[in-house]
Amino acid sequence: HAAAEFGLRWDRWPSCIWASSMAFSGPLPKPVVVHHANFLVEKAAAADCQPKVLQLRQLREAIQRGAGGEDPAWVEFMAAARSSPAMLDYRDRHFGARRPGPEWSTLPEGHVARPGGYSEKTAKKAAAAAAKAAAAAVAKEKTAEE
């Protein structure tokens, strides 16, 4: 739609559109044009927009003070984002070993995200089959002991 309507076309967000998932990519870009507040370190109720509003204010104030990536509160947020189990899971599903889709051949051989092709459904089936086999082995061992 954006290509037809506005003549816009891109393969990834430009760095001036900043999202919390970019906390792994170094300091804040200059300038930050948009903050895509798609992540909270602490889970909040869906109807409660206050935590995201606070995050937006925190970033705006850091940028307005000229501190940006050096602002202590923002540095703390960035560190929390990088160590959050939810963010680590997100990165693994979109850029890591659990990434679906075709091979990204432009990535170097051996890169964790290059192969792609991961399927949550297939992984769940394999885990269920492994659990069933383990339970059967335990049952067989118990029977042999009796």
Image (tube, rainbow, N blue to C red):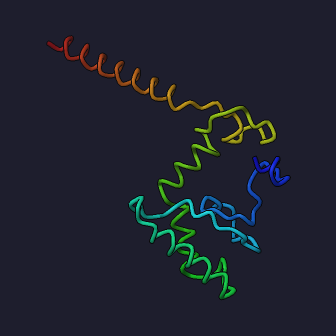
Which residue occupies the extreme right position in the image? Answer: 7
Tell me residue 22's x, y (percent). 65, 61
Tell me residue 106's x, y (percent). 81, 40
Q: Is residue 71 above or below residue 80?
A: below
Tell me residue 61's x, y (percent). 60, 83
Which of the 4 quarters of the picture holds residue 117?
top right
Quadrant housing the C terminus: top left
Residue 67 placement, left or right of 1: left
Q: Is residue 103 above or below residue 84?
A: above
Question: Quick one: 38 or 82, which is closer to the camera?
Answer: 38
Which residue occupies the extreme front position in the image? Answer: 5
Residue at the image position 62 percent from the left and 79 percent from the top: 60
Residue at the image position 55 percent from the left and 49 percent from the top: 90
Q: Is residue 62 above or below residue 15?
A: below
Which residue occupies the extreme left position in the image? Answer: 146
Residue at the image position 34 percent from the left and 22 percent from the top: 134
Residue 7 placement, left or right of 110: right
Which of the 4 quarters of the picture holds residue 68?
bottom right
Q: How many numbered discs?
A: 0
Residue at the image position 73 percent from the left and 70 percent from the top: 33
Which of the 4 quarters of the picture holds residue 66?
bottom right
Tell me residue 35's x, y (percent). 64, 67
